[in-house]
Structures are given as C-alpha cells and as structure tokens.
Amino acid sequence: MGVLKNDVGRPSNKTIKTRRLLTLLVIVLAFAAGFFISYILATKFDNNIVKTKTNKSKNKEKIVNKEISADEAKKIMEDRFIYYGFIDSAEVVNSNNYKTFVAINHTKKSESTYKCNDLFDSLYKSDYLNEEDWIMKIKDDEYEYICTDNTEYTYNYKSVNNKYHDLFYNSKNENALKGYVGQGFPSYYVYSKNKDVYALVDTGGHLGIKSIFGIKKAEIKNNELIIDYAAVYGEFEDGEFVGKQESGKDIRIPADSDLSEAFDKYKDEIDATIRLRFKIVNGKYMFDKAEDI
C-alpha cells in the first residue's frame, strides 16, 4: 500500500482517483457477472418451458387425435348415448323426440306408481282390457296404446331433463320433449302433465323388423369423437334374412345365421351410414349432431 500514499501518510489525489477507478471496475465486473449468470439461468428456464410446452402439445395431440376400436366406441355410446339397431337417419337422431328417448333410457326410474286414469284422464278411450290394462288413444296419433295401472316404469320429468342437459351438447336452451316419445319399439313413453312424469305404455304388438348394425369406424379428432354407424333393416323371407337397401343391392343371409355377428362380414356392403359427432367436454362425451354420409 506504500506506493499509494504520499510522504506524510495521507493518500494522494492520484491514489484516491486510482482507488475509485478500481472500486468502479469491481462493481462493473460484479454486475456483468450477475447479468451473465442470470442470462444463462433464464435461457435454460425458457428452454425448459418450451420443451415442456412442446411435450405437452405432443402429448395432447396424441390424446386428441387417434383412432379407437369399435368396441371402445360402442361402450361410449352405451354409456353416453344409446346403442340399439334402430338408428335409421340423421334427421331422426337429431330430433328432440329421439334425444328425449335417449335421456329417459339413461334416467333412473321413479319409485312412485300411478293409476292410468290419474296419469292420462284426457287421453282415454272408454274400454279396457282387464282390471289393470287400459286401452288409450293419444291425440294426433294413429295408434292405440295399453296403459297398465301401477306401472313400475315412470320417470320424473325434472330428472329426465337434467339428464338431457348432461348428455347433449349445446342443449341449455332446449328441454326434453313433453309428449309422446318413441322410436319404433313396441313400448313408448308418454308424458303425463297431471303427474309431471313419463310413463311406459305398450302397443300390444311385437317388433318384427330385424337389423344388422355396427360401427364402421371411430376416431377422436380435435377434441371430438366421430363414429360412423351403419345399419340395414330387413325381414326373414324364404329361409333368408333380406336386408332392404334403397340402392337395390339387398343383403341376403341364410336364416340360421347369427345376425349379431354378421356386421363385420357385410359392413362394406351396407349403404346407409350415419356419422355421429360427440364433443368432449371436461372429460365427458356429449352428443352434438348426426350426419347422413
């Protein structure tokens, strides 16, 4: 330190200036080192974020875009829609009637039982079959139905309507149909204004139409489940099942064949295919619309 002092022990002006320069240099070097270290850490952190986002994007893409098996698609349809062999057109599937039918089939039945006269007093004909089964005529409907007193199959409208909104995409401004609900089955549901429930009624007939139906293809794409569903309807004639098609290319199968196992063999010959679209919302599959393809 002697070289930085004058003869009387007091630092010279030159020494003071030198010390100040050294101090400033140390500060600058420290600042530069801190900046460099911060830059390295920040760059590494940003790279990690980019990699994470990229990985997440890749993972998301893998989850969102994939083909799924017919069995997996069938299970989703059974859990969140319906899987019967009587879906015959997109127009029918998109209807309020059909969606109400689906909602009822996914709703727990009510614990209450009612007399037919309490349910449908304004829809009655005067005659009855026995002490419990009543023949009824529904307004604007060509068929007669059988209502059974104390039926165990009634469904609360509020419960059905809640299920309707849970199952169908963009349905908040649409409600379950209050009326006659049926889709070609021997049994139908009729809304009772008196008790605010749907009650199961019967046509008294049986369903003679048979079908070959199944899923041709299913995939998840852009947060949407897309199912291509095909079906052909027919009857047994002269020892054969004959599936009638508008193209005239009827499908003929020996009468002793198992129709439930015939789809995989004949699916490419079935003309009518309906594309069912489900939106994936918070992990739930919600039916959006159907298209004839």
Image: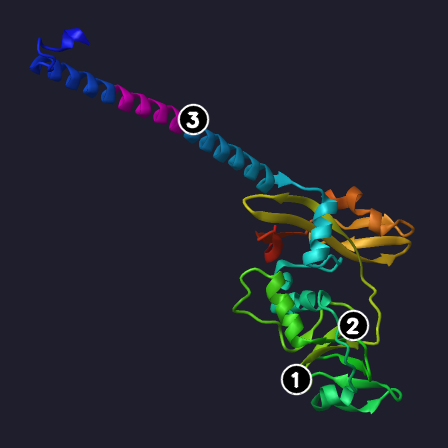
| Magenta highlight on residue 32 | yes
Where is residue 105, by image quadrant? bottom right
Residue 96, disc: none
User: Magenta region's main secondary structure?
Assistant: helix
Nearest the camera: 17 or 293? 17
Which of pointers 2 and 3 lies earlier in the amino acid sequence?
3
Indicate the amino acid at tag 3.
Lys
Query: Residue shown at 62%/69% (left/top)?
Result: 162
240 versus 10 height, above or below: below
Cα gap from disc 1 to disc 2, whole angstroms: 19 Å
Residue 34 position by quadrant: top left
Report crowding for label 3: few under 14, some 14 to 19, many 20 or more residues within 10 A (C-alpha): few
The residue to which callout 2 is attached is 187
| Left or right: 46 in relation to 184 | left
At mark 1, the secondary structure is loop
Image quarter in which the N terminus is found: top left
Circle nearer the viewer, 3 or 1: 3
Q: Amino acid at mark 2?
A: Ser
User: Looking at the image, can residue 248 be seen?
Assistant: no
- The magenta span reads 29-44
Kindly tell me whether residue 48 is visible in this rendering: yes
Find the distance from the CA under tag 2 to the CA under tag 3.
Answer: 67 Å
Q: Residue at x 81, y 77 (%)?
A: 152
Q: Amino acid at mark 1?
A: Lys
Is 200 located above or below residue 84 in the figure? below
Q: Nearer the viewer, residue 176 or 13?
A: 13
Q: Are marks 3 and 1 in contact (CB under 8 Å)?
A: no
Percent from the top left, x then y, of residue 221?
Answer: 57, 43
Q: Nearer the viewer, mark 1 or mark 2?
A: 1
Look at mark 3 in the image and give the residue it sits on.
Answer: 44
**Mark 1 lies on residue:** 193
